[in-house]
């Protein structure tokens, strides 16, 4: 049930942001991974690192305010399931990537993952929209 509620909150935040309002998430940890080409799977490197990073979703733009500001533009929604939603994005530099968002099982929190061809990172977040 918590998983469904978190997904509904996330979907609502994205829907609301597409009509002119802004949604916020606060990342409290992140992990970095790279692609193992022998299995074509992402391998997460080490344990997650604590952080305090604001993520803003406004219209079709997602901005991550980490040490280096990252800006992503939604190209299209690829998939939506009970596990989350997947978007095709373009970075501010014009590089294509996928963004996944969904509930963290057993918590009211959500994850936001950004995946390029050979590496990815994932943020664990709380909802900061007020």
Image: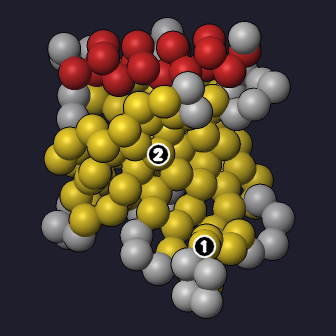
Rendered position, 12 above or below 51: above
As measured in the structure, the alpha-carbon distance from the residue carrying label 2 to the one carrying label 1 is 16 Å
Which callout, 2 or 1, points at the residue further toward the start of the chain? 1
Which residue sits furthest front? 39
Residue drawn at (62%, 81%) of the image: 39
- Closer to the camera, 7 or 41? 41
- Closer to the camera, 115 or 69? 115
Residue drawn at (76%, 60%) of the image: 49
Q: Residues within 10 Å of mark 2 (few under 14, many from 20)?
A: some
Label 2 element class: strand
Indicate the colouring scheme: secondary structure
Q: Which mark is residue 91?
A: none
Residue 42 visible here: yes
Label 1 element class: strand
Rendered position, 73 above or below 25: below
Rendered position, 41 above or below 17: below
Rendered position, 115 above or below 55: below
Image quarter where the N terminus lies is top right
Give the percent coordinates (x, y) of residue 23: 40, 22
Q: Which residue is mark 1?
A: 41
Q: Are marks 2 and 1 in contact (CB under 8 Å)?
A: no
- Closer to the camera, 29 or 65? 29
Residue drawn at (47%, 80%) of the image: 118
Q: Which residue is mark 2?
A: 100
Q: Residues within 10 Å of mark 1 (few under 14, many from 20)?
A: few
Give the percent coordinates (x, y) of residue 125: 63, 36
Residue drawn at (40%, 13%) of the image: 12
Residue 56 visible here: no
Going by the image, does 15 lie left or right of 119? left
């Amino acid at each position: 049930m918590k998983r469904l509620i978190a997904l509904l909150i996330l979907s609502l935040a994205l829907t609301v942001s597409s009509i002119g309002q802004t949604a916020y998430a606060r990342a409290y940890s992140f992990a970095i991974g790279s692609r193992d080409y022998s299995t074509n799977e992402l391998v997460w490197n080490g344990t997650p690192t604590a952080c305090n990073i604001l993520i803003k979703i406004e219209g079709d733009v997602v901005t991550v305010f980490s040490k280096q500001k990252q800006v992503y533009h939604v190209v299209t929604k690829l998939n939506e399931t009970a596990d989350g939603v997947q978007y095709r994005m373009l970075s501010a530099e014009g590089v294509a990537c996928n963004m996944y968002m969904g509930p963290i099982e057993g918590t009211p929190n959500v994850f936001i993952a950004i995946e390029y061809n050979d590496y990815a990172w994932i943020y664990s977040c709380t909802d900061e929209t007020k």
